[in-house]
Amino acid sequence: MEKNFKRTLITTALPYANGPVHIGHLAGVYVPADIYARYLRLKGQEVVMVGGSDEHGVPITIKAREEGVTPQDIVDRYHAIIRDSMKELGITFDVYSRTTSDIHARTASEFFRRLYDNGCFEVQTSMQPYDAEAGEFLADRYVGGTCPHCGKQAYGDQCEACGTSLSATELIDPYSRLTSAPVSWRETTHWYLPLNKYEERLRHWILDEHPEWKPNVAGQCKSWLDMGLQPRAVSRDLKWGVPVPVEGAEGKVLYVWFDAPIGYISNTKEILPDSWEKWWKDPETRIINFIGKDNIVFHCIVFPAMLMAYGDGFQLPDNVPANEFLNLEGDKISTSRNWAVWLHEYLRDFPGKQDVLRYVLTANAPETKDNDFTWSDFQARNNNELVAILGNFVNRAVVLTHKYFGGTVPAAGELEETDRQLFAELDSLKEQLSANLDTFHFREALKNAMDMARAGNRYLQETEPWKVAKTDMARVATVLNCSLQLCANLAIAFEPFLPFMAAKLRGMLGMSQISWEELGSRDLVTAGNPLGQPELLFEKIDDETVQKQLDRLARIKEENRLKNWKAAPQAPDVDFDTFMKADIRVGTVLECTKVPKADKLLKFLIDDGLEKRTIVSGIARHYAPEDLVGKQVCFIANLPPRKLKGIESQGMILSAENADGSLVVIGPTAPVTPGAQVK
């Protein structure tokens, strides 16, 4: 039996303030959360949406060390960027705070202390990675090494190359990312939350009480529960964070995954100091956690166990509609590799196109499996759907009304079957739209809304008011009235998804306050009321604009490749006598020309000190022939002649391959006599 709640508290995962937010964050958490919050508000429900920046933890300290500044400098910078860019995208937080606030420090400390005083923790001493040179214990992210699964470089908690979760003890040749010194191991003591004590209660709450949860969420939780829960540390040996509020804990802070979700509570306290408990402890409040898949365990197992341990009436979330990951152009989004579309940069490069990004991210939302963002799809969805379907229908309806009725809403006459079919389809789509929004199927819900616009285009094509105007203006009035009513319905249907477009459309139609109950109405705009001037709701995005973004990504990919370049492994040893058989000499280039019908080949005429010899070399893509004339080069003189494109090549010019694939001809650093041997 479905329970009726009086209010809804929406929480959104707290982004690390060690960088801006990117499209993966938006598609996974913030756009769906905002869609749902806007939908509930349109329904007249009492809603609070809380968010904030996660400003503690190792990623912050790593960034600060890299830049030579304090962690506070880092979080101040990125908190402002995240907060402002989210607001510009139209994410309607009631509060967007931060975990470095005083109220959060007090709330997190009090939370830990209550659990500590009630004997909820276990104390464990274990061996942890230590950097003797820096004199510090190392958090997982400060440990580097070789992944035992794929052989590539990895962190102490995860290999980004193959995606495997790791521990520092599994890495091959672990080292400190602080000083590059080998990791040593020392004893340290921490407090652990015994998750195993809450296992049965968690299992019943997730699997029995909430069968409606998304399969990806329930499946990951069941996997953890079936493996058996283990105690989890809630403290760390770090200098940056909320200090552990007990004696003997000097130099220790609350582990970020204990500290961060308490931010939902402290943020609520910040905006509602006198009534926050109503939103957290009243059974008639529905709590919804919007997160990405990497946070499922923390929000469905760890944080609920913390709330169970605390007691005092704290309610558990009613749903955790986590999304999977969004990739970028077929590659995993990575902050460390700068492989992302950053929100603040998008807003700069695409001014006024917030709704385009919201639309594309929702249409491609990774709701049940990982999905991919590509710039070609971004362009296609804008041009073929927002412009050609939604924008086209609204523009036609408003422009035709201005043309035939001076911009005044005409009165409808008796409806015909085509008109009734239009509204019947609207009613059906409204039911589907509401059902999909209620169950967090936002991708399908967006399609329902766009299908309303598709119905409008079909309606205009079938009724052809521009032809009927020659004989029956009363019928034209009815058609355009129906079309404008559908436009008004679109302003409601798209409000959760495309709020900027919806506001512009309401202005064009002269609509004021709207509500979800009105969706499906046939009288949203009143006959005789004037329309505003027609405006294009969307504009086409050209190839050049998209190519700039692709070029940027290509540069980033090349920069990452060069940064991670390593020399090829050494070839097998050869004995000295074998090496001495190679006659390497210096020659002077007398002539150099391109070989016809061979993109890679250059033909050299070289003075080798004895005679002139011809050598063909595959370096045409790296040098202009004229740039090599007069240069001295090293070549192997005693290779058997070999024909290339019909030219007999008498040797091999030596060159070195750079990390970027470019070739550099090898030659002496000072002039030498042609024919001189390389010793």
Image (cartoon, rainbow, N blue to C red):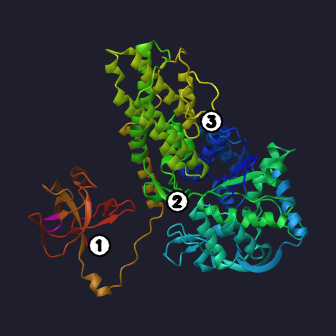
Mark 2: few/some/many CA within 10 Å (<14, 14-19, 20+):
some
Mark 2 or mark 1: whose residue is earlier in sequence:
2
Q: Secondary structure at mark 3?
A: helix
Depth check: give the residue in front, 306 or 417.
Answer: 417
Mark 3 lies on residue? 517
CA gap, disc 2 and disc 1:
64 Å
User: Which amino acid type corresponds to the residue marked 2 in the rendered image?
Assistant: Thr
Q: Is residue 8 magenta-colored? A: no
Q: Is residue 610 magenta?
A: yes
Give SS at disc 1. Answer: loop
Question: Dot 1: within a 10 Å radius of its alpha carbon, few (fewer than 14), some, or many (20 or more) residues?
Answer: few
Judging depth in this view, the residue of 408 and 23 nearest the camera is: 408
Tell me, yes or no, if residue 633 can be seen here: yes
The quadrant in which residue 546 appears is: top left
The quarter in which the C terminus is drawn is bottom left
Residue 454: give x, y in percent of width and height. Answer: 42, 37
Q: Quadrant of residue 215?
A: bottom right
- Specify the label residue 678 is tagged with: 1
Region in magenta: 607-615
Assess disc 3: are there few (<14), some (14-19) or many (≥20) residues with their C-alpha within 10 Å of its C-alpha: few
Query: Would residue 99 be visible to someone looking at this image?
Result: no
Question: How much space separates mark 1 and mark 3, taking CA atoms?
Answer: 87 Å
Q: Is 143 left, or right, of 452 in this rendering?
A: right
Instruction: Mark 2 and mark 3 in contact? Answer it, CB < 8 Å.
Output: no
Q: Quadrant of the N terminus?
A: bottom right
Give the CA separation, mark 2 to mark 3: 30 Å
In the displayed structure, would residue 522 be above or below residue 142?
Answer: above
Which numbered disc, 1 or 3, marks the residue that appears first in the sequence?
3
Residue ID for mark 2: 368
